[in-house]
Image (tube, grey):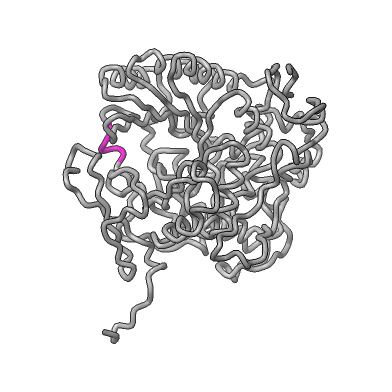
Amino acid sequence: MRYQTGFGGMTEVDSIVPDLTPSDELHKSRPDFMYPMSRPISPAVVAKKAPVVFPHHHGSKFERVPYWQDIPRWKDVTEEQFMSYEWNKNSNIQGKDKLVEFLKDVLPETFPTSADLPNITTRDTFLKDVIAGIDSAPMAIRLTPHILSLINWNRPLDDPMRRQFIPMKSALVANHPKLTLDSLHESLDSPCLGLVHRYPDKVLFLATSVCPLYCRFCTRSYEVGGNTETVTKKRSAKPSKRRWDIIMQYIQDTPAIQDVVISGGDSYYLTPEQLTSIGERLLNIPHIRRFRFATKGLAVTPSRILDPNDPWIDSLINISNLGRKMGKHVAVHTHFNHPNEFSWVTREAAQKLFVNNVTVRNQSVLLKGVNDNVETMGSLIRELADNNIKPYYVYQGDMVKGVEDLRTPLSTILKLETEIRGTIAGFMMPQFVVDLPGGGGKRLAASYQSYDRKTGISTFVAPAVKGRDKENKVYEYFDPLHSLPVVDPLSG
């Protein structure tokens, strides 16, 4: 059968449902056929609990509702406008002043309190706290219409997306004395500006220093985004043809390199021409077998992938197809942290990537109050799987400054893996990892050499990571101080 997919091309398929027409499948809102209803994971140990019901989700995952119209300034924005990447770029909320102006429009006069923020009960106290939080934050403010439309502004204090992207001064926790800006020591493993070569056969190519949205917990707060009150950025990843040429020459001259991650910043902020140029140059290096474009775009501005007037997705699909013909693997690595980040736009964008044979994997970060319980993390993993996005990694929070309120102890990630494993197919089970402070690379969280839960110190070894002072090195990870048990000094 040959039919129109609704994504701009004809596709060969063998229908498994007799007499099913394309309009039945795609154009008459048959989400029950396209996407089995996702459901929270209920491990055996908690099987008797009531089903998890998330308190809020504007962006219906199945119904084609204009969820952005709940925001006063976008109440008249049509679906066609919202799908335009140009409109999205022009409607981003960037900087403290713009955010405060936006918040004044969406916040009610009063709202329910939070156990973590009992003194924030009104719009005025919320705004003052946010302003003070931004002044203390290592990351600048940039938020997209998609994410802003999904936050529950009637209960913003505990909203999982608000917690990720908008700092509150009252929630901030003193930095652990071992925290650093460049926790992973990427700059020390950099043979040339904007390239990290830590693993024997893989490099990290920092192509840009800009993202469509800035996460509070960014591991590259030393580099990414604009300067803040507390951090002057290094800007070593600013796009530059000369810098890229030097990086490409290093890759070409190092036959051991087989794998490249193109990140930054975010690959969404590469132009279609830049995306094509980087992809073709890498494909034409004989020893490069695979590479991935890292982007949070699918999670924060999914409409770009569906925009018929934006050629970025065409460039990506073309590079993916070219790599497939050459026997090389091209993928996208994206970054969802909570199931509420999905809407029908996200699902359609993910489906477009899937039907065009683009491999998509997800890397989540474990964050306190966002996804640090079995129900939420399990639901996120299943949501990803239902959208043909491979749950790849769940990272322990990096030891970077300014976000201790979001970091969890190692014991949390160990518990999550134990309880979730076995509740979903193994090939859709992510690896729960720690990216070791000091440049030890990624290790399975459960592979620690030792873990003292009283001091919060865990140790790891990374035999495959060589160079500098890394031979036989023991790496330490430190739980946040606020998570440590209170010890009676008079007890044994």
Tally the marks: 0
Q: Of all residues shown, which one is farthest toward the bottom? A: 490
Of the 4 image quadrants, the one containing the C terminus is bottom left
Taking the image as drawn, is residue 412 in sight? Answer: yes
**Is 193 left, or right, of 26 in this rendering?**
left
Report x, y in % for residue 399: 37, 53
Taking the image as drawn, is residue 131 in sight? Answer: no
Asked if residue 258 is among those painted magenta in the image, a careful observer would answer: no
Along the line of sight, the residue nearer the viewer: 338 or 209? 338
Along the line of sight, the residue nearer the viewer: 476 or 426? 426
The residue range painted magenta reads 186-190
Report x, y in % for residue 316: 54, 22
Asked if residue 187 is among those painted magenta in the image, a careful observer would answer: yes
**Is 467 left, or right, of 491 in this rendering?**
left
Query: Which residue is rendered at x = 62% and y = 33% of the image?
Result: 350
Query: Which residue is rendered at x = 64% and y = 49% of the image?
Result: 340
Query: Which residue is rendered at x = 16% and y = 43% of the image?
Result: 471
Report x, y in % for residue 167: 53, 54
**Main SS of the magenta segment?**
helix
Of the 4 image quadrants, the one containing the N terminus is top right
Query: Which residue is rendered at x = 47% and y = 41% of the image?
Result: 392
Along the line of sight, the residue nearer the viewer: 17 or 441? 17
Report x, y in % for residue 47: 60, 64
Along the line of sight, the residue nearer the viewer: 331 or 143? 331
